[in-house]
Amino acid sequence: MIHRILFVYLNQQKSGHAILRGKPNRNVRRRPQLGFQYLAAVLEEIGVDSVILDQSITFFTLPDLAKRVRETSSDLVGFYSASALKDEIKSCISGLKKIINV
């Protein structure tokens, strides 16, 4: 049975700030991706805990992610995916599997 899921959103912008008219806008406040919030709410109703890690809000490295997987005792790790992030996600999953020996 699954007790805890870790959802991961990798930042599409390396700067971590919204870009408006070619300049970073540090006044824009980001919140976790809405899709992950919906999933977390439904999972909570059936007794499954979830954690959302959103790199557009809080920067983390691959070792940081592996540490969070261990700390949260996650049974499953889910990634937001889009074609623009395909290679980055594949690389992250491969690296994560090596670090946590899966």
Image (tube, rainbow, N blue to C red):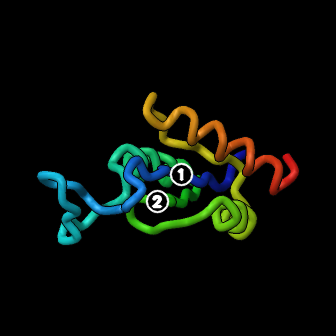
Q: Amino acid at mark 1?
A: Val
Which part of the image, by quadrant, shows the N terminus?
top right
Residue 9 rendering spot, x and y as whole percentages: 48, 50
Question: Which residue is labeled 1 in the image?
Answer: 8
Q: Nearer the viewer, residue 69 or 47?
A: 69
Q: Mark number for residue 100?
A: none
State the separation of the CA atoms marked 2 and 1.
Answer: 8 Å
Number of the front mark, 2 or 1:
2
Residue 75 rendering spot, x and y as whole percentages: 72, 51
Q: Residue furthest front?
A: 22
| Mark with earlier residue (2, 1) | 1
- SS at mark 1? strand
Residue drawn at x 19%, y 65% as measured from the top left: 25
Residue drawn at x 45%, y 68% as measured from the top left: 58
Q: Is residue 14 above or below residue 63?
A: above
Q: Residue furthest left?
A: 21
Residue drawn at x 66%, y 59% as measured from the top left: 62
Callout 2 touching callout 1 (CB < 8 Å): yes
